[in-house]
Each structure stands twice: as structure tokens, then as C-alpha cells.
Image (cartoon, rainbow, N blue to C red):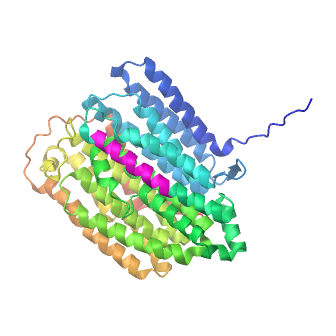
Amino acid sequence: METIAIPAINLAPIMPEVILSIFGMALLLVNVFVPSEQKAYLGYLSLGGILITAMTVLSGWNAPVSGFSGAVLQDNFAVFFKCIFLLSGGLTVLISDHYFKREECNVGELYPLLLFATVGMMLMASGTDLMTIFLGLEVLSVSLYVLAGLNRANLKSNEAGLKYFLLGAFSTGFLLYGMALTYGATGTTRVVKIAEYIAQNGVVAKNPMFFIGMLLMAVGFSFKIAAAPFHMWTPDVYEGAPTPMTAFMSAGPKAAGFAAFMRVILIAFPALKADWSALLWILAVLTMTIGNLIALNQDNIKRMLAYSSIAHAGYALVGFTAGNPEGTAGILFYMLSYAFMNIGAFAIIVLVGKKGEENNNVSDYAGFATKHPVLALAMAIFLFSLAGMPPTAGFIGKFYLFSGAIKAGYIWLAIIGVLNSAASVYYYLRVMVYMYMKNPVEEFDWMKLSAPVALCITISVVGVLVPGVMPAYLLELAQKAVLL
């Protein structure tokens, strides 16, 4: 009788994803038996899952391990990004219960979906095969479509979920078609083998099918990171989605998009650097400029931060365009810093907001510093960091990104980045002017600072100020995690 040999499967490269998936599935089962008024316990369980997963991820630092015939690689690059994803998920959990209780929308599916979205992001960071990256992207995207429309009683939330689904599915088609054309031209979906094929068969670079495939993949990834001109979904989705979900989407998935984009471009297409650098140069300028110019005229603070998020993707693209270790390390540092400052700012927005997503205009913050000076100070710190002012992590991140561009010879790109950063100061300062220099219109007596939200704000303030004052350790970690 013939025996069937079952190959040994090394689960070490995907152990963090396995652990978080188990927690997600367990939460789905627990949710059935937990009364609606006790859904907060699901949040505590999800935080426990995130902490256990984080410990598993950190154990992989400086201990790269590959699995599934090279389709997954847990290296320092993946570990660094996975920490960003888990941090984004954890901070979002801290502010979610407060918001959904206020909105009377205590749906237990929130926490499993957050965990599954984080699993998708982690697969994108560690995937070294186009199909693995696509699998992670779909797990993330499907979860985000539901999270954006989670508040079913709110028409704007419904609209956000539908718009994100339609445009996300459309962009996914571009990405998958690009991957198919690349496979057709090279005969492989492994990013390392694509690079080897190009090195051995230089003529493939002139193959229209291959070049179109690379362009279509760039379009798909540009949508995921909200780079102009593929950013049109961002303002409506960010404004309509529940505020904690907006915070999550602005930090984690954006970092995941950059992780996958960098893994594919820097590893698979190093021989074509002249081509993709020119493309990224144009994307960076368009993204920074469009994001900042439109943000200047926004009155809704969530919409303003949406366009601000587009501009920040442009800053990260400056380091990507450089394509050197300095620029890559700058992206890693900046994505981590951005998670702290942006989710921290949205935590304040959650507190200031009223039921039904009201009180979200910049003018609604008039006199906020008079009534809540500590929270206003925290908001000012986050806004200063977003503007790139010292001594914050945002300043250090932009400095590294622009330094990498200058070192690579992209001096004009760095100058445009600095000018855009200077222009962004206006709309961030506008919020601070209302907080500190306008007479209060509201008493803000509806605000109740719960312990989880206070913890989120505290962690975010520390994460913004400490790397801004003492950036050496974090920058060293970022340098050890670069792909180059």
C-alpha cells in the first residue's frame, strides 16, 4: 500500500497571524453569549490577543525565518511593520468602546474584524510572494469595508462602507491584473525570483506586458496608500466611517500598503529603479500638493485630517523615491510616528464629538483649552507633530525622509516636500487658534474621559514626544529593518 508523505509545515513565520486569528475566531463565538451592555469585555480580550501576538512578533527580531517555500518571510522589516499594525489596532480598541456606547451601536463584530484586519496587514508585510500579499490585502480590505459601514443607523457610515467597497474592489482589479501580467512575463510570483529573472533576461524589461504589469500594480498600491490621483475615496470614507475606524484606517492599512509596495518594488524591480523612481517622484509631488491644498479649505476636522493623511502619504513617498537605506528607514520611523500622532488626534475627536457624529467642525473646538486644558495641550502636541514641528516625532520623521531624498540626489523633491510641510502648518494652527484664542461656545459638559481613552492619549503623547527628543534608539531599529 502506497503511503502518502505529508510535508512538514513550518508555522513559525506565520505564528503571530495564527495566534491573532484564533483570538478573532474565539471572539466571534464569545460575542454570541455576551449581552450587548457587556461588549466592552470583548475589547479587553482583543487587547490580550494583541499583547500576546506582539510578544510573539518581537521574538522574531534579528531571527529571520522563511516558510511555505519562500512565500512568507518574517524578517526585521516585517517585525517592525507588524508592531505598527498591532499598535494601531490596540490604540483603536482603547477608543472604540467609548465611541460605540455613545452612538448606541455596541456591535460585538467590531473587535474580531479589527483583529482579522490586523492579520491581513501582517500577511502583507511578511509576504514575499505576490499571491501572499494579495491574500493579506483581501483579508484586510473585506474587514475594512465592514468596519467603515459598521454604524448601520448612520447614513454617512453606510455611504462610506459602500464607496470604499466599490472603489476598493475596482482598485483590487488593477492590482491583480498587474500581478497576472507580471507572472505572465516572468513565469513566477516570488518577488526574489522576479528580480533574478529580470537580471538574467534583461530583455523582459522592454516587454510591454511586463511594464504594464508593473504600472498596474503601482496603481493598485497607490489606491491603498491614498496617493494622488488615486485618493478620491479617502475624504468621504474617512468622514463617514465611525471615528475610531477612521483612526485605524489612517494609520495601520496605510502602513501595510507601504510595506507591501516597498517589498515588491525594492526587491522585485531594483534593476528598473530609474523607471519607478521617476513614477514615484511624480506621485509624491502630486500627493503632497493636492492633499495640503485641499486640506486648507476644510471645515470638518475629520475631512481635514483625511486630506492631511493624503499629504503624509506624499511625504513617505519622498523617502520611497530615494530608494536608499536612509529613505527606507525614514518611512519605517515615520509610519510608526504617524500612528501615534494621528490616532491620538482622533482620540480627542472621539471625546469632543456628540452622538450622531456631530460637533466635528473646526469651529466646534472654540475655547476647548479653557474648559479642558490638558486635553487641548495633548491635541496641540499631535497637531504640532503632524505639522512636523520640533521636538516631535513628526519633525524627526520628515527630516529623515527629506535627508534620504537629498542624499539620493532628489534635491528639488525635498524642497517641494519642505514647502508643502510649511503650507500644512496653516490648517493645523487653525485648530489651535480656535482652541486657545476663541471664546467657548460650548461648555463641553457632555465629555467623559474614560480610562481606556485616557490611556490611548497618554501612550500617543509619549510616542510623539519621546522619539522627538531622543530618536536615536528608534532610528537605529528602523535602520536594522531596512530591506536594502
Q: Is residue 148 above or below residue 172?
A: above
Count the marks.
0
Q: Is residue 414 above or below residue 141?
A: below
Asked whether, in this view, residue 429 is left or right of residue 396, the answer is left
Q: Is residue 354 above or below residue 422?
A: above
Q: Residue at x 14, y 44 (%)?
A: 371
Asked whether, in this view, residue 28 is left or right of residue 309, the answer is right
Quadrant assignment for the N terminus: top right
Q: Is residue 95 above or below residue 198?
A: above
User: Would residue 429 be visible to someone looking at this image?
Assistant: yes
Asked whether, in this view, residue 35 is left or right of residue 57, the answer is left
User: Would residue 381 be visible to someone looking at this image?
Assistant: no
Q: Residue at x 58, y 35 (%)?
A: 19
Does residue 95 belong to the magenta stretch? Answer: no
- Residue 422: image quadrant is bottom left
Q: Residue at x 34, y 39 (%)?
A: 149
Residue span colored magenta: 157-174
Q: Nearer the viewer, residue 316 or 236?
A: 236
Asked whether, in this view, residue 182 is left or right of residue 98, the answer is right
Q: Position of residue 173 (x, y in %)?
A: 49, 53
Q: Position of residue 10 (x, y in %)?
A: 72, 42
Q: Position of residue 358 (x, y in %)?
A: 18, 41
- Residue 283: image quadrant is bottom left
Predominant SS along the magenta part: helix
- Residue 231: image quadrant is bottom left
Quadrant assignment for the C terminus: bottom right
Q: Position of residue 225 (x, y in %)?
A: 42, 58
Does residue 161 belong to the magenta stretch? Answer: yes
